[in-house]
Structure formats: structure tokens, C-alpha cells
Amino acid sequence: MSNKKKYSMLASTAAVAFILAACGNGDTEDTTDNDNGAGETDTSEDAGEESSNGEQDGPQPIEFDQRVENDGEEIEGGTLNVGYVSDSPFTGIFSWELYTGNPDAIIMGYTMGTLLGTDENYQYDDSGAATFELDQDTNIVTITLQDNVMWHDGEQVTAGDIAFTHEVIGHPDYAGVRYSGDLANIVGMEAYKSGDADSIEGVRVIDDLTIEIEYQSVGVQMLQAGGGVWAQAAPRHYLEGIPVGELESSPEIRENPIGYGPFKVDNIVPGESVSYTAFEDYYRGAPKLDRIELETVPTSSAVAAMQNASYDVFVGMPTDQYETFKDIPGYTILGQDENAYTYIGFKLGEWQEAEMDGEEVVEPAQNVLDPDAKMADKNLRQAMAYAIDNDAVGARFYQGLRRRANSPIIPNFADYYNADLEGYPYNQERANEILDEAGYVDTNEDGFRETPEGEELVINFASMSGGEVAEPIVEYYMQSWAAIGLKVELTDGRLHEFNSFYDRVQADDPGIDIYQGAWGTGSDPTPDGLYGREAMFNYTRWATEENDEFMEQMLSEEGFDIEWRAGVFNEWQEYFMEELPIIPTLFRKAVTPVNNRVGSFDITVGADLDTPGAGLHTLYLTGEDRATE
């Protein structure tokens, strides 16, 4: 339930964060899931043969409703049970400033609150706890709170709490991943970050309800949720006494968090469950439900849990198992295109910490390209892209609920998505041609190509565990690369759990040359937070002067001309897909099974929070027992 900064790392089974979607805002999730019997070697080979021209004869795209209304008289109170389907436990970091993975975003969505609301295009509107105004002439953003927004401990949410969240992220001891060029764009932020200033010059509290934030420059992306304005609040009165470097491990974040959302945290079993109780003083009105109980459900148990009507709502129901649960009685399945994509990243450099001269920043922390990296040759990267058949992967493993991605910009961002890009449809012949022309030749006749310098080429591939198709898909990719003479081996010979996987990818582990991950894109199409030079989330460590120029143009004031900005996006996508620091593999649909005793439920983007079923506080039940028909 947040317009948090754009990106989330996705775990290996989630589908859509119901709380975020139900509030018409927020991020998404997920990577690879379960085997439906199509994961054997012969299936992979067949898949490659069927779609060599990029066409697909498999399942056609499935359309879903995004809202359901069920008959029945509303009961008083009651408990909504949510099954969060995941093989990766949530970390339990209840802080928009400190979390990194989407599992934590999901569990926070019930409790932390939404500062700024958005419409169907993810643009700020007046539906949240505060209003938003951008003055292009002065480069000032003004955020004005309603006067009835309360923290769960009874204290009022103030402009000082909005300032505090900026002070946390900008603090010299902050070790999280949320500091970015967007925040560095605030007047005085870099001086504060370096310790040269005790406050942030451009962050000015006008009164208890009003804050002004002055930027060095503004752009049209700042009108989007997550598009350059850090629009969060953190309870200064509750957290200020804790050193910033100790916040993440503090009980105030991990055990007893407070927010201003419709439900407050009652109990946490780390990684397993969260109990929430209604917050009677919620500024939109007291919730109709008494409680929400969220429990993690392994992917292997999800279908059985649905058959047994164990939960009212399933978050992250694995799409690879869709055929096995689509007709289970007692549930309506809602669905939508996710703000997310799966990708294969190439390690092309390393993260360089800021270079300091005393307390002065000489060079900011940034991604540094290594021209001698194993995967530095874009010919190698392009050949690997042509060698895999993602049309078939989406059809065979996900019953058509995923499809080949042709861009790092998702189709949901219709104004900026370049639908004309071909991308890399399966073409084994073209892959072999590229490698031959680039000098990758099997010189010792062992079946695998050597580098153009005649050296052995072994590519170490890291991917996440989770669900039954995680391993078969990885095996398929490796077999596809072997078919064009590339020796690709799993890092450590196995798949890795979500948290340890991303820890190693973020740390530029030398045992990883390529990796399969997934991004929740958030609600702003601007890709600087993933592919900018100073973006910590740019895990490939790709950085070029041409890319810097594109990022600068996207974020410039000229971008208020949407047509001009769309042209920049189109050119950037062409450039990106030529350079190919990642292979965008799959766009996805998310499905949300909702039990028929839930009165109404709406996952439409931008749904009015006051519409029944569109806001958590309006959810209600029509019976004491879950429906089974």
C-alpha cells in the first residue's frame, strides 16, 4: 500500500501483492515456479523446435476480471485469512526505507499506510493521506497532510515524519539500498550525506502538516508514484532515538512496528506469519474486519490449501500451477498484467564505493564497467538471447500466463513501451552465426566453444530455488546454451534461496557470471533506478556514457512534453536491447484467488480507495465459514 521507490527484487513464487493492488498502488513480485511435467530434456528440445520464428502455438493469452462482488449479507467484524504463497520467508523489515525484497513489501502493505494516492496511470491524485503539488518554476514539491492521519500509537502523522524518512536514507550511516540519484537531487542532500551538513537544506517543514522539498531540477517522472519523490513518512517520535545504523535490527522495526494504515501489527512470527488487528482511528474510517491473519504457504502446498478452503485470499498463487487450481469451487480468480518481468543478467563490472577525501566525496558510489569481464562481448550476450525460447517457456511452464519479453519497459507503461521491438525470438541458427563471426570456436573439439583468444569459456549461472519449475527452466536454458556450444554451469552446482541469492548478486560474487532474477518495476517507467550509473540495484554494473545521456534526458524538464519523452524511451529501448546488459525473458500475469465469502474485492489499478473492496478498510465477509462452492 505504498508509492515507495520504484523497484523490488522478486522472490521465486509470488504473483501480485494483493494489499498493494487492492489499494490501487504499489509494487509486484515473483520469478520461477513449478513443473507441470514439461521440464524434462525432451520437452526443452521440442519447445525450441516449435517457435524458431518467435511464433507460438501454445495457450492463447487468458483474460481475467479484476473485480468481484459476491452476494450475501455483510457480517460484523470477522477475520480475513491470507495465504502468502512463497518458498522464501519474509525477512520482516517493516520499513520502506530499509526493506529490499518484495516479500517484506507485501506484509508491510497492510499496516504502513499510503501517503499519496494514485490514479489508473500511477499518477499522484488526492486519494491518499496527503496531497501533492509540483512547482516547475521553483523546483519545489509541496506535500500537505490531512489533519486526521494518526500513527498506530495515537500520535499524529506530521510533516516532520516526512522529513525524518529523508534524514534516515540520507544519513552517512545509512546502509540500505534506497539512496539514489532521485534523493541526491534534493538541494543539500549530498552535503548531508557526506556529513558536511547537519540538516538537509532543501527539506523544509513549513508547519505540522506541510513540507516543502526543493530539488536541483524537476521532471515529469516526479508526477508518478515512485518517480523521483520519496513520498513516505516514518515515525520520528518512535524511531529518532535509535542510531540509523542500528535501525534495521531494532525491535521497533522487526517486532513492534507502527504505521498509519488500516491494520496494526499484533504479532509476528518471523518468516512465517503476521497477525493484524483493525486500527479504529484509521483516517478513512475504522475497518470493517476485526483482524487479518497472514501465513506463508509453501508452493507445494498451495493447491491443497485452496482445495481445503484454508484461506480467503491467496497472494502469489504460482501461475505455473494454474491448470490445477483454476476450477476449484468456492473461489473467483482475478488477474492482471504484473508490473514486473523476469530477466537474465550479465555481470559486466563491479560496484565501487564512494571515493572520499576526508569527509568530502571525490567520486560518488557508482557502477564501474569492466571491459575485460567474461561477459563483456555483446555478441556473446546476443547469441545467448537468441538461443533460448521464451515463447515456449511461457506457454509450456506457465500455461500462457507468461510471455516472451521484448524490452525492459513493461507493456503496462503504454506511453513508453516500444511494442515494435522484436527482441530476441528463438533463433538457434542466428545464435551460432553470431558466435562464429565473433570468433567463439570449438578449437579442441570437446563440444564447447573457446573464447576468441583460444581460452576455455565456462559461464557460471546463478538462479533462485522455489517451486517445481525453477530447476527445469534453468536446465532448459543451460541445455539451450550447450546446443550452441556454450558451457554453462550452475554456481555451486545448485539453485540458491532468495535472500542468499540476492546477497551474492548484490555483492558481485566472482562465482557468478550470469544470473536469473526478476524485478517488480513499481509504478514509474523511468529505469534510472535499475540501470543508472549510480543505481545500487543495477546489479549487472553496466554503465556507459550513452546510457547516462538517455537517463539524463528522461529525467529532464523537457520530459514534461510526453511525446518527446516517449521518443527518448523508444530510442533507449533500442539501444538497450542492442547492448543487452540483461535478457528480458518473460512478462507475466498475476492471479489472485478470492473466496466467495469475501463481499467484494478489486485489484484494478487506481481503484478509488473508497470503493467497496478497493481499500483494505472496506473489505468485509458474508459468512462465518469460507465458501466451498
Image: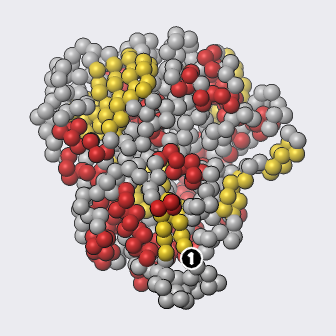
Pick the quarter of the image with the N terminus.
Answer: top left
Q: Quadrant of residue 457?
A: bottom right
Quarter the C terminus occupies: top left
Compare residues 195 and 146 and report the one nearer the observer. 195
Q: Residue at x 24, y 50 (%)?
A: 322
Quadrant in which residue 617 is drawn: top left
Q: Identify which residue, 195 or 567, lies in the foreground.
A: 195
From the viewer's perspective, tell me whether residue 550 is left or right of residue 524.
right
Q: Nearer the viewer, residue 442 or 373?
A: 442
* Percent coordinates x, y for residue 530 in the rendering: 58, 52
Which residue occupies the extreme right position in the image?
A: 358
Residue 623 image offset from top left, x and y in percent = 17, 21
Residue drawn at x 57%, y 48% is 503
Which residue has dot 1 on it? 457
**Residue density around tag 1, few if under 14, some if 14–19, many if 20 or more, within 10 Å:** some
Left or right relative to 53: residue 270: right
Q: What is the three-letter code of the residue carrying label 1? A: Leu
Residue 528: x and y in percent read: 61, 52
